[in-house]
Amino acid sequence: MTSAPERGSQALRASSANSASAWRAAPAPHMQRRTLLKSLAAASACAALPGLGRAAGRQALRIGVLLPRSGYLRAAGDACFQGAELARQLLPHLGYAPFELVAGDTGEDAGSAVRAARELLQQGVQLLVGCFDSSQTVEVAKLAEAQPLPLLINIAAAPSITQQGYRFVFRNFPDAQRIVTDSYRLQKELFRLTGFTPRALALLYIENGRGIELIHDLFAPMAMPYELAVSLPYDPRAQDLSKQVAQAAASGADALWLVSRMGDAIRITRELIRQDWSPGLLMSSNANFHDAAYREALGVNADYAVTFTPSYDPRLPLSRRVRELQAALHPAQALETEQIYTFEAVRIAADAYRRARSSAPEALAAALRTTSIAESLSGAPLRFDAQGQNSALGLDAIQNLHGVGQVVLPARAAQARPVLPMPAWHTRASASAA
């Protein structure tokens, strides 16, 4: 017998001949957006009325969404929350179990994250999704396990989170070990495809140090073809990063790897331009250079930067539907990692509730352990190993080309061919005009 989510997936692949479908393409883009929003608004209104939009006799699962909605991580937290909203709008149309979202602001530090989690518990949430920041997620995971209450991690890479033997903590995001390994592997493939191999690398990283030890530890085992010239920590709240950039340039490196947040990635790039240092490769494994904030801040100077990140396969039917909805609801914000992995976390929660038929912590956790969803936005299956980690997930390489972030690796999902080395900053305006 076909399950509700499976029926929804079949519906996504069905022909658009049904004129009543919310997804049918309209003659003009503005009419398509208007029709889509009108249809979803009507469905949401029905779901809000007593007795409508819910399975008979079933209460909606109350999902606490813990994200940094204030402080220096606010932009990332807001983008993640868009993903939760995409799930709230779309999943009911795909046959998933009913749920409600209850938002919590984790702020800038782990203490505020724990306080926000406790507030959500007092509001009666039955499952948590969050927290984006690893240090916050480490502490919230301890609280969730002690309650107990299931925690579904949308984004956070600290390996320790899923190495504690927790029974109620699940992560649908690569850990730092996988992120670093894949970053090195994708670099080698970039070098092969472009014919550019740097001689030396400078590493510029947030001084909390999370994951940096793995970059050093795995450098020799991965047999990288360049020298690791210098590793420079910095405070992400610092406005002046000229000293660190000057030290990186003085090292003789012709590649720069940032482990940074968006705000400081923008400041560092501006400092590169000011000091007229043009490395042949500018890359990041956690500040998404392809995000709108980076591209809008830097214009033509955002081009050619490379991000190694968990992404999605834009060719898949479900990916197209989520991207259409994102474009309708947030036309100025492209669908990125933050939205994608928060959407998937909420989706996994709704699927577990459907199968558990209970909001009891033990029942939900048992259902999460047996998660098996073949069709995901990334193309990888959604499932958890004995540690609560989805080890099937990996990274893509996304390069800004002609003002748009495009997947260049892996080949199965590639939208464009990579271009290296990066042209010098002073050539960008003339190259753009040409």
Image: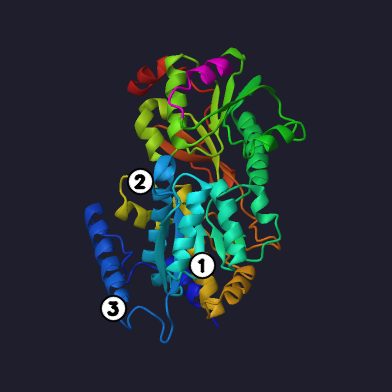
Amino acid type at image mark 2: Gln
Residue at (53, 15) in percent of width and height: 246
Residue 256, picture quadrant: top right
Taking the spot 64% from the left edge, 44% from the top edge, the residue there is: 176
Look at the image and say whether residue 245 sits in the magenta stretch.
yes
Q: Is residue 288 left or right of residue 180?
A: left
- In the picture, the disc for residue 333 is 2
Q: What amino acid is at disc 1?
A: Leu
- Determine the image quadrant of residue 355: bottom right
Mark 3 neighbour density, 10 Å: few (under 14) some (14–19) many (20 or more): few
Q: Are marks 3 and 2 in contact (CB under 8 Å)?
A: no
Q: Please name the residue shown 32% across and 75% down the image.
A: 47
Left-right relation of 407 to 321: right
**Magenta residues, as a range?**
238-249
Residue 14: name its quadrant. Answer: bottom left
Residue placed most toward the observer, 44 or 403: 44
Query: Secondary structure of the magenta portion, mostly?
Result: helix
Q: How is the image coloured?
A: rainbow
Identify the residue at the far right of this view: 221
Counting other residues with Cα less than 10 Å from the Cα at mark 1, is it few (<14), some (14-19), or many (20 or more)? many
Q: Name the image quarter holding the N terminus.
A: bottom right
Q: Quick one: SS at disc 2? A: loop
Question: Is residue 161 positioned above or below 401 on the image?
Answer: below
- Mark 3 lies on a secondary structure that is loop
**N-terminal of the two: label 3 or label 1?**
3
Task: Point out the image quarter for the C terminus.
Answer: top left
What residue would you read off at disc 3?
Answer: 49
Which residue carries the number 1 mark? Answer: 127
Where does residue 136 sit, x and y in percent of width and height? 54, 49
What is the secondary structure assignment of the residue under circle 1?
A: strand
